[in-house]
Amino acid sequence: MKCVDEGYKYDTIISKAKRIVVKVGTSNLTDERHRLDSKKVEKLTREVVELKRRGKEVILVSSGAISAGIGRLNLKQRPRDVKLLQATAAVGQNVLMSTYDRYFSAYGVTIAQILLTHDDFRSRTRYLNLRNTLLTLLKTGVVPVINENDTTAVEEIKVGDNDSLSALVASNLEADLLIILTDTDGLCTYDPRRSKKAELIPVVRDITPEIERIASNGRSVGGMKTKIEAAKLAMNAGIPVVIANGAKENVMLRIIGGEHVGTRFIPKSRMNDRARWILLVSPPKGRIIVDDGAKEALLLRGSSLLPSGITGVEGAFIHGDTVSIVDTHGIEFARGITNYSSTEIERIKGAHTDDIERILGTKRYDEVVYRGNLYLIRGGEDEGSTEARLSWNKLSRVSNPA
């Protein structure tokens, strides 16, 4: 297979990564009958242990619970009924963790099981509690093994796939690197199993519509669409990503060693924790519409959002929710944590700060959205200007970390 950019100089940030999130797909853990393959589990364990020996912190996001359950229950195929699927996951999760524990214990390494849903990221309090738990586990030398809670998750709280989950975990922990292991060599221009013209794309610096098209139009395999979506989320948080073939011997060690393995996704910059949560994790509960003067103040002067610049509000939200801030054309250019509910903002919109107490009977804050809790949307339709890029940098500097 050819490489599109063989002359690329490997980014030293990847080889020096300290905290690494590793996502392993079902195909890297199971045999042709979709049962857990002990040799594959042992291979993965050995590489993770070696990374730890080299001073790395490793968080494992692992698929495979449903396949393990299929094997234990002697099912002929993956269940289609949701209840049976969740029951299979419950059985399989125990099998999966027991298998991991057996192999990691052989190397004297302790593991911890963590099952998550999207609610663990949407709630700021739960998000921070999760972060503290994971950091404590890493500090004590434990390897967290994370999976989506397929047993209890319903559509409203499902992350959707472990690729996305790994990106959320990497963002939560401010990881230095996300490695996504799959059954292909990386992102290819065509399906290498079907076309001799297939070329590995070794480096991606920006996930363009063309990259997304390659990943989603059937020309690549291994669920590449969800992997690209995960890579995009991680890159937006400033975290480099490598998608590589988990079947290759010592693949993670080779990545850390600087070898050209897989497809590397190189971000442009990093965000602080609060910005990551607001922009990437917490979905907006509503929209605040502002006039041109307020937009200019936010973009160019790093100001807080005051009620005087607000012309309208959409949706129902409460104090502490994440909201979109849009201009008069409905284009979102910022997000932030609101100090007032949608009902309160509807009453004080257009008013001077000094009038808040008279209108509401109380005044908790002068600002509807404080500048330390407000971040501009990068790459928005209206952010091609130098001023917009500068304002992003300015807000990043003045914003308070979590």
Image (cartoon, rainbow, N blue to C red):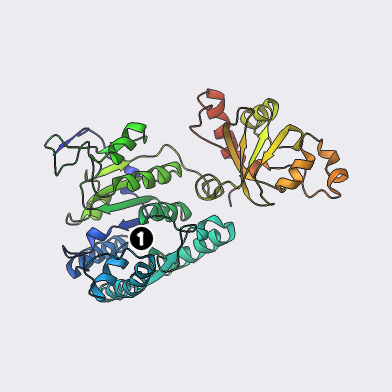
Q: Residue furthest right?
A: 358
Q: In this view, does 386 lie to the left or right of 46?
A: right
Q: Residues within 10 Å of mark 1 (few under 14, many from 20)?
A: many
Which residue is at a point 57% across and 58% down the rendered structure image?
A: 123
Relative to the observer, which residue lies in front, 312 or 4?
312
Residue 282 screen position, x and y as percent? 54, 50
Q: Is residue 323 left or right of residue 49?
A: right
Looking at the rendering, which quadrant does residue 101 occupy?
A: bottom left
Looking at the rendering, which quadrant does residue 30 occupy?
A: bottom left
The secondary element bearing badge 1 is classed as: strand
Q: Residue furthest front?
A: 81
Can you identify the residue that label 1 sits on? 61
Residue 337 screen position, x and y as percent? 64, 47
Relative to the observer, which residue lies in front, 251 or 283?
283
Residue 376 screen position, x and y as percent? 57, 36
Looking at the rendering, which quadrant does residue 252 occupy?
A: bottom left
Q: Which residue lies furthest to the left in this view?
A: 196
Which amino acid type is marked by label 1?
Val
Residue 304 screen position, x and y as percent? 69, 38
**Number of on-image labels:** 1
Relative to the observer, which residue lies in front, 78 or 382?
78
Q: Which quadrant holds the N terminus?
A: top left
Which residue is at a point 17% across and 64% down the rendered structure image?
A: 31
Which residue is at a point 79% across and 40% down the rendered structure image?
A: 348
